[in-house]
Every structure is written in structure tokens, then in C-alpha cells.
């Protein structure tokens, strides 16, 4: 009987080991599936946000300034009428940007998850996108400062010419969408192509 008992005990041990192995394999398979699903969902989310942001940046950079844009600028009594006009024109860019504040906040937040799932080296397109937005805002501010300086110059034609050329060059950043010398759109499209390449490798595996 002892031999039979030993035999059944051995079978029981083997059954437990097999069951444990199956459980571990199942957990690992589930983990791979779960992580894979999360990667796909994250890739879809980032790609969708990227497309939205590209359209948002194009809207922010529209050369057409509509009636009422810039009206939210709060001027001080110390500003002249010319300064108010300059600052209001610059503020148009900030007003437009504010409409998309939540979108860019979501992109900034998802950037960290994207780095965790895909690697820090893969967030460059996202950083380039966010940098473009900051460049647009900085350019609008710089243009206002240059225009104020231009109005203070009296009779220095050479200096006026230099300032006008610099203003025109910088205006292409916040208002140059569609221009043949547009410095922003190529950067935006390059970042879009890079993020598409990263995301579609994951999304494409489900097709």
C-alpha cells in the first residue's frame, strides 16, 4: 500500500507542478496581452491627439485676423494707443492658443506614459510638436517688441530696414501658414511622419 500511496502522492505533486506552470504561463500570456492592448490604445490616443494638435496649430497660425480677436487684452493706462494696437495684435496668438489649452495639456500628460511604454527616445516627435507651439508664442511676443522699437526710430533708414526685415521673418512663425517660406509647417509634418511611423507599427499589428 505504501508504494501505491507514494505513487499517488507523486502524481499529486506532478499535477500541482503542472497546474502551477499553466497558471504562470497564463498570467504571463495575460500580461503580454494586457500590455500589448495598452500599447495599442496609447498609440491610437497619441496619434489622434497629434492630428488634432496639427490642425490646432494651423488654426492658431491663420493669417486672417477676425473682428473681435485680441479684444481680451487688458491694457494699462500707461500704454499709448500705438502700444495698445501692437499688443492687441500680438495677443491674438495667445487668445487662439488658449482655445486649445486642454488639448496640449493632454498631450503633455500622455508624453510620460508614451515614454514609459515606447522608450524615452520615441517622444522626440511629441517634444517637437510642443516646441513648435512655444516658438509661435515666443515669436508673437518678440514681434510686438520689435514693432515698438521700430516706432521709436526716427530717420535711421538702415535700422528701419533691418527691423522690418526681422519683423517680416518672425511673422512667418505665428502667421506664415501656407506661405512658401513657412518655417513651421515642414517641422510639423516631419514630426507627424515620425509619430505615425512609431504608432502604426503597433496599431498595424492588430489589422
Image (spheres, rainbow, N blue to C red):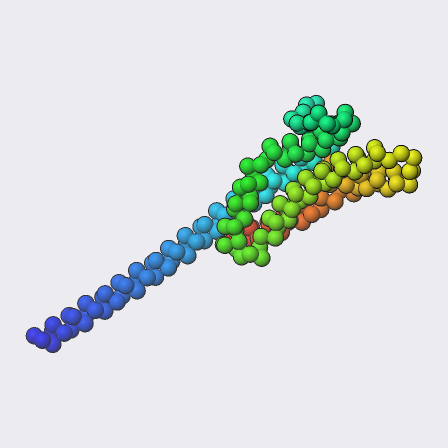
Identify the residue at image location x=71%, y=33%.
Answer: 90
The picture places residue 151, in percent across and down from the top left corner, at 83, 32
| Whether residue 113 is visible | yes
Spot the residue most to the top. Answer: 67
- Residue at the front extreme of this rendering: 78
Query: Where, by quadrant of the figure, is residue 121 drawn?
Result: bottom right
Which residue is pictured at 53% across the width and 41% down the height? 106
Quick check: 88 above or below 36?
above
**Relative to 91, 20 lies left or right:** left
| Quarter residue 18 falls in | bottom left
* Horizontal and vertical percent position of residue 126: 60, 48
Residue 27, percent from left and from top:
34, 58
**Residue lying furthest bottom in this view?**
3
* Residue placed most toward the observer, 98 or 124: 98
Between residue 144 and residue 28, name the one nearer to us. Answer: 144
Would residue 48 be visible to someone looking at this image?
A: no
Residue drawn at the location 7% of the way across and 74% of the way down: 1
In this rendered view, identify the residue nearer to me: 205 or 196.
196
- Find residue 161 and report its horizontal and vertical position in percent: 88, 39
Looking at the picture, does residue 198 appear above or below residue 145?
A: below
Q: In this rendering, would 173 be left or right of 5?
A: right
The residue shown at (75%, 35%) is 144
Total number of numbered labels?
0
Horizontally, residue 41 falls left or right of residue 161, namely left
**40 or 182, which is in the foreground?**
182
Amino acid at each position: 500500500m505504501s508504494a501505491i500511496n507514494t505513487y499517488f502522492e507523486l502524481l499529486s505533486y506532478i499535477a500541482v507542478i503542472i497546474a502551477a506552470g499553466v497558471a504562470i504561463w497564463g498570467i504571463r500570456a495575460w500580461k503580454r496581452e494586457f500590455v500589448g492592448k495598452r500599447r495599442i490604445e496609447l498609440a491610437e490616443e497619441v496619434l489622434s491627439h497629434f492630428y488634432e494638435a496639427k490642425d490646432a496649430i494651423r488654426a492658431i497660425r491663420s493669417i486672417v485676423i477676425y473682428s473681435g480677436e485680441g479684444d481680451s487684452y487688458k491694457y494699462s493706462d500707461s500704454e499709448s494707443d500705438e502700444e495698445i494696437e501692437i499688443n492687441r495684435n500680438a495677443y491674438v496668438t495667445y487668445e487662439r492658443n488658449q482655445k486649445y489649452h486642454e488639448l496640449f495639456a493632454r498631450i503633455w500628460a500622455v508624453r510620460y506614459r508614451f515614454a514609459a511604454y515606447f522608450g524615452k527616445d520615441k517622444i522626440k516627435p511629441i517634444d517637437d510638436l510642443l516646441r513648435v507651439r512655444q516658438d509661435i508664442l515666443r515669436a508673437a511676443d518678440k514681434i510686438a517688441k520689435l514693432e515698438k522699437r521700430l516706432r521709436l526710430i526716427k530717420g535711421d533708414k538702415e535700422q528701419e530696414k533691418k527691423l522690418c526685415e526681422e519683423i517680416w521673418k518672425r511673422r512667418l512663425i505665428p502667421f506664415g501658414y501656407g506661405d512658401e517660406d513657412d518655417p513651421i509647417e515642414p517641422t510639423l509634418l516631419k514630426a507627424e511622419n515620425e509619430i505615425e511611423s512609431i504608432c502604426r507599427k503597433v496599431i498595424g499589428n492588430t489589422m
